[in-house]
Image (cartoon, helix red, strand yellow):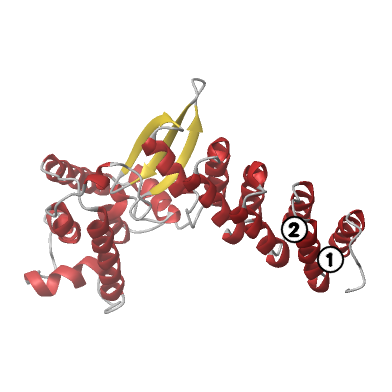
């Protein structure tokens, strides 16, 4: 984290600061700079007033169009930022278009910066809003940041949309459940994915929840998330889709802990011993871990299955 950024470096960040578009280090740099810089505090206040004025006339955007606009905006920012490194970022953007002189006054910059952000969102703000867009459930434009339980059985969720918002309710509430399902797919925060599985595990009887756990078990890059999903799926280990996932995990997962617990679950819930024996024998032909091989052999002997194929 760089805590010594200049005003010229901080001010472009102030435009995206309220929208949650900065990295953690950038947000920290802005916060530290604002504590000691009156000029940038005034700049931020001017931007906040402009945002408030725009929000008074805001219309909830289409989720799909908003996501596309934001992606396009980020691409354009990256292209322009790399086009002429000898000039300040916002001077390169607005200078050629507006004929701005080299002594451009920063008093005019908040309006210009807000115009840039508005350009990215204008199409979405005036597009028809589908009914599904009114429920805070899509992961396409939202990032779940925090999950917290309360003593009355409700769950509090803090998440990002255009700006950070909060949703509270019970796990069975549609918005809460769908937000938790979205959190199971968060690509950046494995701890958040673990928490979301934990809160949903008592709802595994619901097909969409169970499918989310199967997906996490098969493909989540974090071992802790896969173990949590495996635990949640234990009551349904005899179901075809879950058993198929367990077989894939046993043969392909990179974690010895996950594979060991998968063996135990398959053996505990076996229905077709010949099918399970075939899976274990297939595993034994590939398995390099001595302990897991021993567990597999023990299971095969308990079923009186042949060890000759190894």
Does residue 237 appear left or right of residue 256 in this picture? Answer: left
Which corner quadrant holds the C terminus? bottom right
Q: Which mark is residue 263?
A: none
Is 10 placed left or right of 117 in the picture?
right
Q: How far across and down, in percent of the image, does residue 234 sit? A: 67, 44
Above or below: residue 216 compared with residue 252: above
Q: Residue at x 14, y 68 (%)?
A: 94
Q: Residue furthest left?
A: 99
In this rendering, the answer to whether 13 lies above or below 181 is: below
Which sits in the foreground, 41 or 283?
A: 283
Is residue 297 in view? yes
Depth check: 74 or 181 in front? 181
Task: Reply above or below: 291 against 204.
Answer: below
**112 to the left or right of 223:** left
Along the viewing direction, whichever of 210 and 21 lies nearer the viewer: 210
Residue to which mark 1 is pinned: 289
Gap between marks 1 and 2 measured at Cα:
10 Å
User: Contact, CB < 8 Å: mark 1 with mark 2?
Assistant: yes
Which x, y percent locates residue 137? 36, 45
Q: Please name the residue shown 77% across and 59% down the image.
A: 276
SS at mark 1 in the image? loop
Q: Please report whichever mark, 1 or 2, sits nearer to the chain's N-terminal start.
A: 2
Say which residue label 2 marks: 259
Residue 48 image-quadrant placement: top left
Q: Label 2, secondary structure: give it.
A: helix
Mark 2 burial class by Cα count in 10 Å: few <14, some 14-19, many 20+: many
Q: Let me know if residue 221 appears in the view.
A: no
Of residues 288 and 273, the one drawn nearer to the viewer in this rendering: 273
- Measured as percent of width and height from the top left, residue 35 is found at 36, 42
Tell me which corner region of the image, top left, top right, bottom left or bottom right, holds residue 284.
bottom right
């Amino acid at each position: 984290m760089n805590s010594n950024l200049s005003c010229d470096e901080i001010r472009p960040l102030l435009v995206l600061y309220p929208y949650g578009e900065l990295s953690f280090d950038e947000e920290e740099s802005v916060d530290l700079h604002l504590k000691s810089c009156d000029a940038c505090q005034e700049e931020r206040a001017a931007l906040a007033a402009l945002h408030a004025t725009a929000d008074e006339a805001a219309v909830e955007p289409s989720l799909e169009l908003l996501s596309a606009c934001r992606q396009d905006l980020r691409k354009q920012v990256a292209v322009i930022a790399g086009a002429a490194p000898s000039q300040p970022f916002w001077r390169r953007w607005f200078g050629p278009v507006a004929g701005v002189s080299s002594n451009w006054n920063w008093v005019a910059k908040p309006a210009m910066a807000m115009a840039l952000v508005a350009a990215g969102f204008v199409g979405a703000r005036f597009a028809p809003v589908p009914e599904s867009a009114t429920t805070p459930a899509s992961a396409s434009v939202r990032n779940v940041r925090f999950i917290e339980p309360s003593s009355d059985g409700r769950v509090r969720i803090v998440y990002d949309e255009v700006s950070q918002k909060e949703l509270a309710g019970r796990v069975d509430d549609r918005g809460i459940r769908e937000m938790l399902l979205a959190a199971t797919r968060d690509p950046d925060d494995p701890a958040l994915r673990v928490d979301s599985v934990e809160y949903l595990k008592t709802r595994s009887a619901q097909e969409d929840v169970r499918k989310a756990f199967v997906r996490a078990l098969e493909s989540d890059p974090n071992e802790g998330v896969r173990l949590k999903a495996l635990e949640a799926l234990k009551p349904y280990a005899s179901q075809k889709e879950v058993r198929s996932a367990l077989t894939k995990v046993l043969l392909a997962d990179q974690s010895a802990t996950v594979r060991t617990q998968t063996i135990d679950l398959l053996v505990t819930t076996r229905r077709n011993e010949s099918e399970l024996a075939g899976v274990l024998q297939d595993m034994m032909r590939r398995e390099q871990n001595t302990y897991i091989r021993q567990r597999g052999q023990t299971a095969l002997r308990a079923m009186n299955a042949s060890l000759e194929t190894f």
